[in-house]
């Protein structure tokens, strides 16, 4: 638990005057059977004891600490991480195989190409990838609700809800910054002429309809559940954040299967920046927005210039020192949003509600 006082502010303190303490002087208990009367205790005719109080956290907790409640057990965090890792792998394999079968039927690929290990990213395979992450995020929601015993609302933020007003204000900052960032990339790299054939239109439709959900799904998996799961193993706001960030950022980087050192570093920086953004804004809204803006805008350029496969290439030698630029952009955008959240006094701590 945190070092904050365990007692709530005075206006919410229970009335403990003698007349209101069961068994105290002047206390009038309601007759048996009336509302509020204690129920008979099994095995003790006529006797009654107050029901056991449901354990609750009484000190406000940060995002990374939110699973550290009286119901917390160390194995719950480990189980969450293992289950989510298995879900991502299973959904990815199953839907990729299904997508490859569809591509074979459509003639988008051939058995000879597959035999040579030549796999080209098609609209169907992109859809399969996005759906596998969305399905994995659904598993994250179930773990949050039924394993960690938290209301679904607290997965969005410590405020217990999705803060649409904060998302709107953050969008005013994030979208123009990423549009400018992508425009600079286009001017510097000159990716090629725009080609709007049937494949490009299919890519565009899938990117616009499912990539925002895919990006948000990754945030709900890695920053929403995994960061909190690892953070629940230690006590205190800073230790929980450090451990949660370390575990979630490393797993986030590994999940992208990059073999290039620069790309691995980029994914680590991205994961750390999103962890900071989530911790210091108290929720996943801003991180999901940044992730979605980054993916959607970059994919739009790749889709309209016929470079989707190149954009998804993570093999050794693809990256280089130029990757420092997107690292700085992500870090700068996160810093701007953190300052904006601080100016608005956004809620960053809360008492986790008790659930059955």
Image (tube, grey):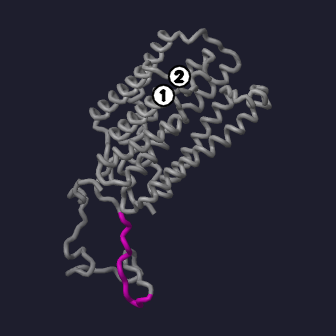
Secondary structure under the numbered disc 2 in the rendered image: loop
Residue 173 makes an appearance in the image: no
Q: Earlier in the sequence, mark 1 or mark 2?
A: 1
Please tell me in which quadrant of the rendered image residue 339 appears. top left
* Rendered-image quadrant of the C terminus: bottom left
* Number of the label disc, if any, that sits on residue 318: 2
Q: Residue at x 66, y 14 (%)?
A: 196
Decide: few, some or many residues near mark 2? Use Cα within 10 Å; few <14, some 14-19, many ≥20: some
- Between residue 279 and residue 110, name the one nearer to us: 110
Predominant SS of the magenta segment:
loop
Q: Residue at x 53, y 35 (%)?
A: 256
Decide if residue 348 is on the left or right side of residue 153: left
Decide: few, some or many residues near mark 1? Use Cα within 10 Å; few <14, some 14-19, many ≥20: many
Q: Position of residue 244 (x, y in %)?
A: 39, 46
Task: Give the magenta part as a residue range.
Answer: 43-55
Q: Residue at x 66, y 19 (%)?
A: 200
301 relative to 277, above or below: above
Magenta segment includes 65: no
Tell me if label 1 and label 2 are in contact, CB under 8 Å: yes
Q: Residue at x 35, y 25 (%)?
A: 332
12 relative to 120, above or below: below
Q: Position of residue 151 (x, y in %)?
A: 45, 53
Q: Position of residue 253 (x, y in %)?
A: 48, 36
Reading the image, the residue beneath label 1 is: 263
Q: Position of residue 223 (x, y in %)?
A: 43, 42
* Number of the label disc, if any, that sits on residue 226: none
Decide if residue 179 is on the left or right side of residue 55: right
């Amino acid at each position: 638990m945190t070092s904050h006082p365990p007692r709530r502010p005075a206006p919410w303190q229970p009335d403990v005057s003698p007349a209101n303490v069961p068994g105290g002087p002047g206390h009038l208990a309601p007759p048996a059977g009336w509302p509020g009367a204690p129920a008979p205790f099994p095995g003790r005719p006529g006797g009654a004891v107050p029901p056991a109080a449901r354990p609750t956290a009484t000190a406000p907790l940060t995002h990374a600490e939110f699973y550290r409640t009286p119901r917390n057990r160390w194995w719950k965090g480990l189980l969450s991480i293992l289950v989510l890792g298995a879900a991502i792998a299973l959904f990815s394999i199953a839907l990729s195989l299904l997508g490859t079968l569809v591509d074979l039927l459509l003639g988008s690929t051939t058995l000879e190409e597959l035999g040579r290990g030549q796999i080209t990213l098609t609209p169907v395979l992109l859809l399969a990838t996005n759906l596998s992450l969305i399905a994995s995020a659904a598993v994250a929601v179930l773990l949050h609700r039924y394993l960690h015993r938290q209301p679904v609302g607290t997965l969005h933020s410590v405020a217990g809800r999705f803060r649409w007003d904060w998302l709107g204000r953050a969008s005013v900052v994030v979208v123009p910054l990423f549009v400018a960032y992508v425009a600079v990339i286009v001017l510097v790299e000159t990716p090629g002429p725009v080609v709007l054939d049937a494949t490009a239109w299919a890519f565009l439709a899938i990117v616009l309809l499912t990539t925002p959900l895919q990006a948000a799904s990754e945030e709900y998996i890695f920053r929403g559940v995994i960061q909190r799961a690892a953070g629940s193993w230690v006590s205190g706001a800073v230790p929980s954040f450090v451990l949660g960030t370390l575990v979630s950022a490393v797993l986030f980087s590994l999940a992208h299967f990059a073999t290039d050192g620069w790309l691995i570093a980029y994914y680590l920086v991205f994961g750390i920046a999103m962890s900071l953004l989530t911790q210091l804004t108290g929720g996943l809204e801003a991180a999901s927005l940044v992730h979605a803006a980054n993916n959607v805008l970059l994919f739009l350029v790749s889709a309209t210039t016929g470079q989707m496969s190149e954009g998804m290439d993570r093999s050794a030698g693809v990256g280089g020192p130029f990757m420092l630029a997107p690292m700085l952009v992500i870090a700068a955008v996160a810093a701007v949003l953190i300052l904006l959240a601080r100016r608005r006094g956004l809620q960053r701590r809360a008492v986790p509600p008790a659930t059955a």
